[in-house]
Image: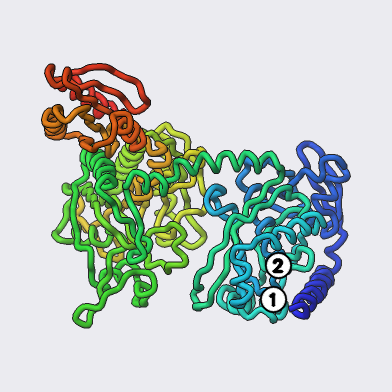
Amino acid sequence: MDDYFSRRNKLFDQFKEKRRRELGNKIGKEITITIDKDVVKGKAFETSPYKIASDLSNDQSMDHLIAKINGKLWDMNRELEGDGRLEFCSDWNDLEVRRVFKRSSAFVLGAAVEQVFKCLVSGGAVLEDDYGKGGFFYENFMDEVVRNSSINDHSKIKKEIEKIIEEKHPFERLIVRKYEALELFAGNKFKIELLNEKFKDDDFLCVYRCGCFIDTSVGPHLLHTGQIASFEIISNTRFLSDTKREILRFYGISFPTVQLKEEWKIMTQKLKLCDHKKVGKDQELWFFHPHAPGMVSLLPHGKRICNSVQSQLREAYWRYGFAEVQSPIVLNKDLWYYQSGSRNQWWQQYNFALEIDKEYYILKPYNKPIHCIMYRNKSRSYRDLPIRYVEFGSVFPDNIKPFRLNGRLRSFQKDESTIFCQSDQTKKEVLNCLQMMGSVYNKFGFEFKIVFSTKPVSFYGDNLEWIKLEGILETALKSLGHEWERDEGGAPSLGPRIEFYVSDNLKRFIYLCGIIQMDLMTPRFFNLTYTSSDNSAESKPICISSTILNNTETFMALSAERYGGKWPFWLSPRQAIIIPICEKCSEYANNVKDRIHQAGYYVDVDMSFHTIEKKIRNAHLAQYNYILIIGVSEMETDCVNVRIRDGEQEGVKSIQELLEEFEVKIREFK
């Protein structure tokens, strides 16, 4: 392996020199750099942001984590190529800055693992969630002996990481052609496979060197490894790759200051207490089983929450004029030929396919194609429009390989609607969807962010159609009166799109819930038409597909973390528990339970042989909203002694008073 590392390093230097020669007389040309209101002079392919920062202020040049040139992220030690506006970035709260820091930290992790175990690296990636498995990971191929010895011992890796950080290795960027990359990584057969799989023969790609470690990376990176003040290896895991080879993946987290690391530790502990996996287990809401990887099983109390969530969705859709439909869960592959517009067999790779009577059928990944068939079930007139379908049920979007699940679901329950309307009805329909989604998120207590995605480089339909639809969506968004962001070129190829991201406990808007998708493609593929008002011609309807929650199970998990398992009464699977203080009160306790149950609330009775104190404590731990104590005096007066979850005692109340209080809680979503 040492020969491979040495040869790789020499080739990097050779290719770097080759790139310099290719630049020729471009090197050294005078360029003008604007920083705020200042203007400085530099030389093309010689002057770097770090050099400029050093000249301006020796004390602060090391504080900058990354640069931007004309708004584009740029390595601090990468030479500038022409005139531009330069910015320096060091704000840890800036997500772009944090991604760069994580990317460089992952590179350090890969360098350390390669050096310690003399193994072949596969690659690494940045993770958005710092409080899950970590901020980044790196994958490696090792032989079985090394792998077994390193699976739980991170001490050698941590020591090597500390050494790399202390030595302040710079991150060196180099652009190479594919054939050069193949030569560079000729000693790593796994990297060769990846290069051949991802790049065409005439492609260029970016590689970086840190010390003697070299790997592909999109960049940019930090100035040097010394900017990493604190580094932790969180965990490792083993799984089989697509090629059936076993991979060892290391997860890590890092920070530019020790104080940030301590804050992360404190927040990690807090989040563990309300983690949806812990809440689900402690409250017996849901679980996963190896026989159904990537699919959730809801226990009775979890199904209660699911029913409450879907009840609110059904009420919202009903209020905005949607008609609920139901379609088969297994459909012939020919339907997906319509949707994909091609005769290839993509569905066999990505969806659950079944062979029945020598025909292939698919567990449906989504509902829109079936809704199109429903639309075509009879002739349509302009008087019929708009038509609004909504469907609730299980979908099977991707047959994800088990080792790639990483928290994703192979099957989940989804609310999915499809609107067919005339062009002049589009704005109103989009605005209705926007208002409906906002009302649902507000009801559950979630803040949300709206992102408007516009035409990508490659798109379906013509430019004028896109301009018109984008204008309609933008007008609807302005009418909504809520802040929104524009994602230029971020829409899928079939039409412009609006996305709703709800916040988590850390106020991060990283969970995609609501989607409003304009669809230029589907009406053409399914030949959807309606008779126009003058009966002279057939027109194609505008197709709008949308979802409020996208994935009910994921939304339930997010809600569990938002409430920390302390569900509000209207959503709680354990709204009340009755605790009789003696056996004599048992019959009355069951009578009260029946009356509350008949009124439509979730109520239990604790008939165990525990002490009253133990029963009350168990009820608090189980997060019952109301604890109803029944003694002889309560039995004789047809009352209950009421305690609420936080320990406050409300005193004696009649059953009628209690039910009226429950009704207010439900009505006001408390």
Q: Which residue is mark 1?
A: 181
Residue drawn where x is 26% and y is 33% of the image: 575
Quadrant housing the N terminus: bottom right
Residue 85: x %, y % from top left:
74, 46
SS category of the residue bearing label 2: strand
Residue drawn where x is 38% and y is 46% of the image: 557
Residue 501: x %, y % from top left:
44, 44
Residue drawn where x is 22% and y is 30% of the image: 578
Quadrant housing the C terminus: top left
Q: Is residue 558 above or below residue 203?
A: above
CA distance for labels 1 and 2: 8 Å
Q: Is residue 381 above or below residue 145?
A: above
Mark linked to residue 46: none
Residue drawn where x is 33% and y is 38% of the image: 622
User: Do tag 1 and tag 2 residues touch (Cβ < 8 Å)?
Assistant: yes
Left or right side of 627 for 231: right
Q: Amino acid at mark 1?
A: Ala
User: Reading the chain from its start, which is encountered first: label 1 or label 2?
Assistant: 1
648 or 267, which is in the foreground?
648
Q: Which residue is mark 2?
A: 207
532 or 80, which is in the foreground?
80
Left or right side of 637 for 99: right
Q: Amino acid at mark 2?
A: Val
